[in-house]
Image: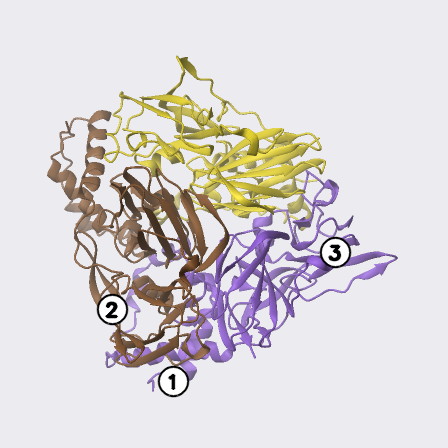
Chain colours: A brown, B yellow, C purple
Amino acid sequence: MSDVPVTHTITSRRAFLRGGALAAVSLPSAATVLASCVQTPAAAATKAPVPAVPPAKTPLQRADEMDAMHEQGIKAFPAKTAGKGNQLMQPRMDGSVKVYDLTAAVTDWEVEPGKIVHAWTYNGQVPGPQIRVREGDRVRVNLINNLPESTVIHFHGLEVPNDQDGVPFITQPPVKPGGKFTYEFTVPNSGSHMYHSHHNATKQVGMGLLGAFIVEPRDLSHEPQADVDYVMILNDSMSGYTLNGKGFPATEPVVAKRGQTVRIRFMNEGMMIHPMHLHGMHMTVIAKDGWAQPSPWKCDTLNIAPGDRWDVLIHANNPGTWAFHCHILAHAESEHGMFGMVTALVVT
Amino acid sequence: MSDVPVTHTITSRRAFLRGGALAAVSLPSAATVLASCVQTPAAAATKAPVPAVPPAKTPLQRADEMDAMHEQGIKAFPAKTAGKGNQLMQPRMDGSVKVYDLTAAVTDWEVEPGKIVHAWTYNGQVPGPQIRVREGDRVRVNLINNLPESTVIHFHGLEVPNDQDGVPFITQPPVKPGGKFTYEFTVPNSGSHMYHSHHNATKQVGMGLLGAFIVEPRDLSHEPQADVDYVMILNDSMSGYTLNGKGFPATEPVVAKRGQTVRIRFMNEGMMIHPMHLHGMHMTVIAKDGWAQPSPWKCDTLNIAPGDRWDVLIHANNPGTWAFHCHILAHAESEHGMFGMVTALVVT
Amino acid sequence: MSDVPVTHTITSRRAFLRGGALAAVSLPSAATVLASCVQTPAAAATKAPVPAVPPAKTPLQRADEMDAMHEQGIKAFPAKTAGKGNQLMQPRMDGSVKVYDLTAAVTDWEVEPGKIVHAWTYNGQVPGPQIRVREGDRVRVNLINNLPESTVIHFHGLEVPNDQDGVPFITQPPVKPGGKFTYEFTVPNSGSHMYHSHHNATKQVGMGLLGAFIVEPRDLSHEPQADVDYVMILNDSMSGYTLNGKGFPATEPVVAKRGQTVRIRFMNEGMMIHPMHLHGMHMTVIAKDGWAQPSPWKCDTLNIAPGDRWDVLIHANNPGTWAFHCHILAHAESEHGMFGMVTALVVT
């Protein structure tokens, strides 16, 4: 159908993705412009002769080329990459205390096939390991800092005692490179919360120092029944636009059987809003920042701002593979196909 | 009042608007900067001689000049332009099936007086024709693609069967240039929804491939009574900041008689949030994405994110012409006067 | 601990803050890039000889340097600066009419220690004086325009008669430099509202022409009891990211005794969203734009869009000094420490 070899098309798409999702909307950097300004006479003289003009492509040929790149992305989904973030972490028990050891370090992280970034991670994962405890549990978090900068952990949303809040020079000294620090508290409130760096955090959270801290309520009688409970952490930093540390097509589909109830816990650790849109079914919003909404309400597009957590329920009653993506379209699709904040809800 | 001829002032304002609303907040492109970097000695030598310095203007003179541009914009409102989008479309009936033929094509579109863009349209309109049906109706949409790219239609918010969802390579092949595709479904849920391209959509929706898909509920007993029912689609792409495809002063005022109830159906097809602010009266928020809010709530500024639809009621009890605009002020006003996402609610 | 003298570190931090908070996220301007493009042979020839390479710093040394800057900012909080905005204004009484004289003028404004901007102010304050009246009060506002541009005042959220709405050429002529205008109305609705320029407003509001207009309801029986009632106006314009006209560390802490109830009235007069995040306690959202939320709801991060007002209650039950900041981290922290939209809730 196309006069462009498929392998070439694939290469273009890969090269595009490797360049980083954010590049799709980036502005010229000073360096780029400067480099373009500089042209020595020698460089000008060694320019290649003008090649013979190839025959112009028809709109259909160009459409076929574009469509092949789009198809390639969809067919690759879910693409395999090294590393998986947001893995449920089992605590060590010290008597009745649940102990979590979190080592912050620089780690190569594959965001999409072939796109490797030097992430800053907890235990080698982006997002860091998922912590799941219960209201009233005694929890100890040992932070080991193997980063080249000082760091701390803030438990975003947890109403811990002030000296466990993780803000340098307000509640504790920063933890130096090579240093350690222990947080310990009784989990005071339930809900979908987060932990992340609160030191040089524009950089450190952007580099990957973030994770989910889920607290089940002591009283489960008001807790909604869900067959699938899925944490989806949004980010928009040095890894591009990501869901749980991966960009499409390396994102993970959410899978449910027809008739099941899916709970999604959206968390935004980025710098921009991301209105997440689900195709084919609606979402019932049940909680904000871990607090039950007094009157759950329905939508298909939910605007999630930095620092927000929103819990929604989906009644998976419409079978098929459904696109599920940020509706700022530039965070989800380019001329080369879908990328970034795109996944699917698969109802079998 | 001013020592600058009025015709000159008008020209400046027009030239500004012609340049595009988005230019008001744009950053220098690489091309611009590069062009500025390049200056040959010859160009420098042919520079015009320095003109005699005109007498400095007083603050009052400069204020008069600025005010004249502002007045010009207001006095021009609502300015006539060629083309009107979002026009209610009557279906053809094929038995009991409501049939809508939508032809996607490139069309010159006048956004503001004299500002013509090469829009991508359904049936020559931006937004495309307004589709209004009822829950349970059988609907057929014939898409004819006269664009130079493949395209598809996604029915945003409608819980249609998967194969009618309009996502290339997930639910259907893209519709090639010159091709056709037929969607057909029984309308499953009511509310304020949208239809738009879901292929290369950052570009295609930005160029104009979008429209309203309104579904009245089968049971009207819970439907609020409204004397005026108005769809307002926000966009922020190649046409600049627009309401229903037009920028101020070519936007359309919403008109109501004192005592009437106005229903506005806000829809955001852009890439940015737009907090819409109404002067003089408040809005009661009754639905999100077509789903009734369990507890309607009041506001005068409503933050509308990309992909969102919000339905509000306004009790038009305060007579006069009231500004109604995006409160990101850079989307609504410049030194040259109001532009972009500005209209008025006129209560007579 | 560090091999860099502390005084040098302070200077760096000050210089950074002086450069403006927004610079932390700014893109290269055309001017910057152009300047970099230009290099005469003479300039190149006079370059200093390459200095001897100093011994490389260890990660710990660099961490100590960074941490010292962070500590310096925290220790300086709340830093003294000249001028305080948002001060409660006592009206003159003319019979039963409450009279407020507001003079708009250019005023030097100290945003942070040593960072002075040429603000446009009401009565020399950014935000302008806080107006607090009661529903049904008769209010007169005399605007005296000592600015070099025309201006007007719009009472954002107040459902005043049309001719008091302050929109040039729709409801009144602009008030020329040196001119005066009187607004007078019976306060029609209660809640947390604002007043600001509505002429060339992208510039004028950005420069500082804004203030709070708080209206207590006539019927206080539904009004929540609050021990502390605090207005927090967000802005993101020429002064950088500010809370009540000041950037961290010159922002003002909110102070409460343990067990007290704090009411915060958030108002966004900027161009960007600001999701405000409180540590250690949650917020109960009770009103939007002055209208009671039918079902108050809880959160710890509240997304505040331009033009929005949100009223929240905080039960100050967790003792300590708690960070309270915009969770778009680039509005709150850089490599040099916290800046901009950061303050604290101090529970004693």
Picture residue at 56% right of the left edge, 25% below the top: B80
Q: Chain of mark 1?
A: C
| Percent of width and height locating residue B261 | 64, 33
Give whichever of B201, C19 is nearer the camera. Answer: B201
Q: Are marks 3 and 1 on the same chain?
A: yes
> Which residue bears the numbered disc 1?
C5
User: What amino acid does circle 2 point to?
Assistant: Gln
Say what secondary structure mark 2 lies in: loop
Mark 3 to mark 2 CA distance (whole Å): 55 Å
User: What amino acid does circle 1 point to?
Assistant: Pro
Picture residue at 76% right of the left edge, 55% below the top: C218
Other-residue count near label 3 (Cα within 10 Å), few / some / many at <14 / 14–19 / ≥20: few
User: What amino acid does circle 3 point to?
Assistant: Asp
Q: Chain of mark 2?
A: A
Q: Chain of mark 3?
A: C
- Point out the image quarter for the N terminus of chain A: top left
Picture residue at 43% right of the left edge, 32% below the top: B189
Give whichever of C342, C239 is nearer the camera. Answer: C342
